[in-house]
Amino acid sequence: MKEFDVVVVGAGFAGMYMLYRLRRMGLSVLVIETADDVGGTWYWNRYPGARCDVPTMEYSYSFSEELEQQWRWPEVMSAQPEILEYANHVADRFDLRRDIQFCTRVTSAVFDENASRWEVVTDRDKHYRCRFCIMATGCLSAPNVPDFDGKDEFEGSSYHTGLWPKDAVDFNGKQVAIIGTGSSGVQAIPVIAEEALHLTVFQRTPVYTFPANNHPLNTKTESRYKENYLQVRHMQRYSPVGMSTFMLPKPNPDAPPPSSILDTSEEERREALHDIGFSAFRTYSDVYTNIEANEVACNLYRDTVEQLVNDPDVAEKLKPRGYPIGCKRQVFDTDYYEAFNRDNVTLVDLTANPIECITPLGLRTRQDEYKFDILIYATGFDAMTGALNKIDIRGKQGQTLVNKWADGPVAYLGLQVHGFPNLFTITGPGSPSVLSNVLVSIEQHVEWISDCIEYLGKHQIREIEPTTDAEETWVEHVNQVAKGTMFTAPTCNSWYLGANIPGKTRVFMPYVGGVGRYRKKCEEVVTSNYEGFTLSPEVNG
């Protein structure tokens, strides 16, 4: 059995940076990755239209000034191929692949209490021992495929947007169906509609989308970023969502404070919407905190859908109802509503006409039967905990992580779990993760973990794990901060809560308090001698 200082599970952006940091510390590291190359979410999510939903000048590593200055992004929000190319460039530039075991899935990680070591087992029946086990498995990496009756009997080609093949899928002349209108569906539908003979969209819940307004990145903007990256990175790290305000217009000190949407007239709201689009909702102080104000914004949104979609019946089906703006992940679109004005696109409302089963030639709903050549599941992920729960993780006294989290994930700072010493989770539940520019959150966690491991070595500490009090207090804080926001509104059923997975306990998983606030908490924990953690010295220490 080969032994390493650290085993890292996952070779996406988190795993790659973790490897880079640990290797520079002189530690022996093995990274284990299911795919045959690096990239993580950008390796698997190759579906048509896939792209970043934050500016890629800021969705990038900050640890190398040379990398920052030399890499060029083609668009403001670059597409999947460019982001995967960036990941491969990083792997090449820093020679990361020599410490990565590809095409290998971790099946279990079990803690040996006597030796204070983790034993990691793979589907290749390889066993590794390590002092530290770091889960860089990603928050959105366990695809959710609904268990429809007959789904294995479909005779055509079927795909999940989160498991898209490397080779391009040819839609030309094909009857295509897509189930789901979340983020990946919204991105894919307009692109597929341009090529397919006919596209049938099966929608369960209409979604609030906001125009991406994406465009090629001009050299002036690129130069300004590169000249001011130090300032940009500092702003990102202490901002609410990991984004700088570097390129935004400077606020007018004489401008009136944000108004309440409830205090404005309908004419004023429509004028604001006409002038700056759906971003107008953010200019009102109460849309995301007051359910009555939120409903006013929702009505305004629904009116706008009517203007964008030609067919009144289709427009009515596309109007989100029954849940507030802001309860689900912000979805940015490019020509999404315009796609439903095409003659070759049909919308099926699954609320009124649910799917009964998949058939060999297509699918059957309660009222109709459909035939198609290609079936696409744009049905999202078992978020935050799904990838971790697929691994048999066992801590002290054989306790499984699945059982520990049976009533919802419990973790301190989203970094560690009581009863599982020396196990770290990058962007785990209870951290900003999916509510942030995740590259910023990844770098912060990787740096905190690597600094922690260095500290343990210098001070001859054998094990680190959070106390139950710290863990429970943090989870209580996470829920308290989310209380009163649209994320936890009674009518909100989002994957933030695990509501998209049958049988999953409804618990709000990410931290809504902000990237900057969270970072300061993590810094305070360290300066207070790792407050909330139990540090066990070496036996001979």
Image (cartoon, rainbow, N blue to C red):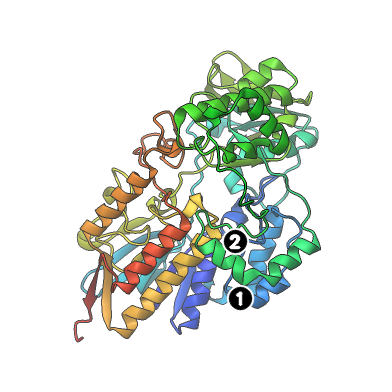
Picture quadrant where residue 308 is located: top right
| Residue found 37% across the figure and 74% down from its top | 452
> Disc number at residue 39?
2
Viewer-proximal residue among 92 and 329: 329
Of the residues tagged 1 and 2, which is closer to the observer? 1
Name the spot of residue 58 as percent of width and height, x first.
62, 61
Query: Considering the numbered disc 2 on the image, is that residue within a helix, a strand or a loop?
Result: loop
Percent x, y of residue 29:
45, 76
- Residue 490 found in image quarter: top left
Specify the farthest residue to the top.
367
Horizontal side of 296 relative to 508 (left or right) equals right
The quadrant the N terminus occupies is bottom left
Distance from the alpha carbon under mark 1 to that under mark 2: 18 Å
Inspect the image, locate mark 1, and give the three-letter code of the amino acid beneath it.
Answer: Ser
Q: Earlier in the sequence, mark 1 or mark 2?
A: 2
The residue tagged 1 is 64
**Nearest to the observer: residue 53 or residue 512:** 512
- Three-letter amino acid code of the residue under disc 2: Gly
Residue at the image point whose x is 41% and y is 33% from the top: 489
- Tell me, for residue 246, which label it has, or none: none
Placement of 196 over or under 170, stated as above or below = above
Disc 1 secondary structure class: loop
In this rendering, the answer to whether 309 lies above or below 392 is: above
**Left or right: 71, with 136 as reference point:** right
Q: Can residue 137 be seen in this view?
A: no
* Vertical order, 502 against 343 (above or below): below
- In the image as oriented, which residue stretches furthest toward the front? 254
